[in-house]
Image: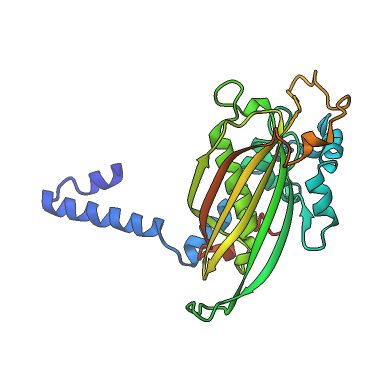
Amino acid sequence: MAGLSISTRWLRPSTASLIKSSFLRSQTANLHQQGPSRSAVVHEQAFPQNQQAPIPPVEQSTTPNSHKLDSLISQIPLVQSLRQSHTYKESRPHLAIPPAIRQHHFVGGSLAGPGKLALAPYMWTSSRKEEAKESEAISKSSSAKTSSVVSVFHIGRDLCGHPGFVHGGLLSVLFDEVFARCISAAFPSGLGMTANLNVDFRKPALPDRLYVLRTETTKVEGRKAWVHGKMIYLPLALPLGQSQTASVYDIMPDESLLSEDSEGAVMVAEAKALFIEPKFADSMVSVYRT
């Protein structure tokens, strides 16, 4: 704006104000432009442009306790049931993100590591095609894909707000992350952006626990998809701090401590959200469709 003030120094106040107003309107219009040029900007910003070698992301799958954690997760009755199911497909989306992008990814990079998210979250996805009801208005497509996703992950003690309690903002982030995976089947591009997210916190979330997050797409209308979910933690405590003084290698859990139906399992939050497929989705990096 300094250059603008110099160029209008000798103009009458009304003329200078008009020029400044026009300039601001043009900048705002460019900011909200949804056409090809705006898409190109989004696309370019999705990839790091510097020439320095990227910092290797934390390898969530090879932390000292991760192999035992993987084995422990395999003992969860829910996981065993999902792996035997023919309708659910298992994946670990964050491990499929290219390293150059993953190092900048909030969940896959910044929150990964001992004391935080000790291993990449597991996800099981079930998609189905639902025919539009006769009473409903027919959109671009007469049917839409809806999905259910079950995710299992460990939250460490370095992600607390108040000491001894997981930060509520982290729970919101994890809801948003798994929701995005859940609605990906609803859109042709596989990409959706959060328009609204509401989280109801039911009980305090404790660190050093395995969590189960269940989500389901409830409605799809054109470029809009609605989703809801709930999050619980399992009773078994798994203290995996950065010091690595605690190890899961000596833990021989009672099977009841790994069950969603056990007395000690606690539902910590429920959430619902609206996602919208952006008009510039064709220029975005597809992170969740793996």
Q: Who is closer to the viewer here, 6 or 184? A: 184
- In the rendering, at what x and y percent does residue 157 appear? 67, 25
Q: Is residue 97 left or right of residue 180?
A: right
- In the rendering, at what x and y percent does residue 45 appear? 56, 51
Asked if residue 245 is positioned above or below residue 153 in the image, the reply reads above
Residue 284 visible in the snapshot: no
Instruction: Classify the position of the N terminus by image quarter.
Output: top left
Q: Who is closer to the viewer here, 5 or 250? A: 250
Q: Is residue 243 left or right of residue 20?
A: right
The number of numbered badges drawn on the structure is: 0
- In the rendering, at what x and y percent does residue 259 appear? 76, 40
Q: Residue furthest front?
A: 263
Residue at 88% across, 28% down: 252
Instruction: Classify the position of the C terminus by image quarter.
Output: bottom right
**Quadrant in the picture for residue 159:** top right
- In the rendering, at what x and y percent does residue 41 appear? 51, 57
**Quadrant in the picture for residue 241:** top right
Asked if residue 147 is positioned above or below residue 112 in the image, the reply reads below
Residue at 56% across, 45% down: 270
Q: Is residue 66 left or right of residue 129?
A: right
